[in-house]
Image: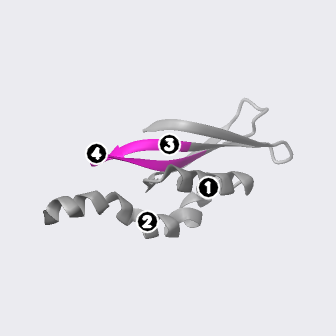
Amino acid sequence: MEVLEEYTSVNQNNKYKYNYRLTKSIYRGRIGYGIEIQSQNSIEDNDTDCEQDRVELVSIHRHKVKKILMKLYNNEVSPIHLIDVIGEYVDEHVYEFDVGEQSEVIN
């Protein structure tokens, strides 16, 4: 997995920082893009609590994944809620990774 872009959101009132990352992975010879969110609580203290979650394969279309990533960033979605928010979208687009393989199997 390779990180292509990263966006950071810092909320001073609640003392947390979120990192939103657009990632790239290879799945069965195809490039797929994913999302990773990492939170860091108590930025100012030495005692930090970090959480992280990711979906490595969201779509083969970078622009679609970036659009979702920016919505997550703009709404300050935590890693705890990542799957709840994008799970349905991922389920609807999982077929994109098998499109090339189906034509190879048929021929």
Q: Determine contact: label 4, label 2, CB under 8 Å.
A: no
Q: Is residue 87 left or right of residue 85?
A: left
Whole-number angstrom distance, CA of label 3 to CA of label 1: 13 Å
Q: Which residues are magenta?
A: 22-37
Mark 4 secondary-structure assignment: loop
Q: Is residue 27 left or right of residue 14?
A: left
Which amino acid type corresponds to the residue marked 3 in the rendered image? Thr
Whole-number angstrom distance, CA of label 3 to CA of label 4: 16 Å
Mark 3 secondary-structure assignment: strand
Circle 1 Cα neighbour tier, 10 Å, few/some/many (<14 / 14–19 / ≥20): few
Q: On residue 67, which mark appears?
A: 1
Which amino acid type corresponds to the residue marked 1 in the rendered image? Lys
Q: On residue 23, which mark appears?
A: 3
The quarter of the rendered structure image containing the C terminus is bottom left
Kindly identify which residue carries mark 2: 93
Whole-number angstrom distance, CA of label 4 to CA of label 2: 17 Å
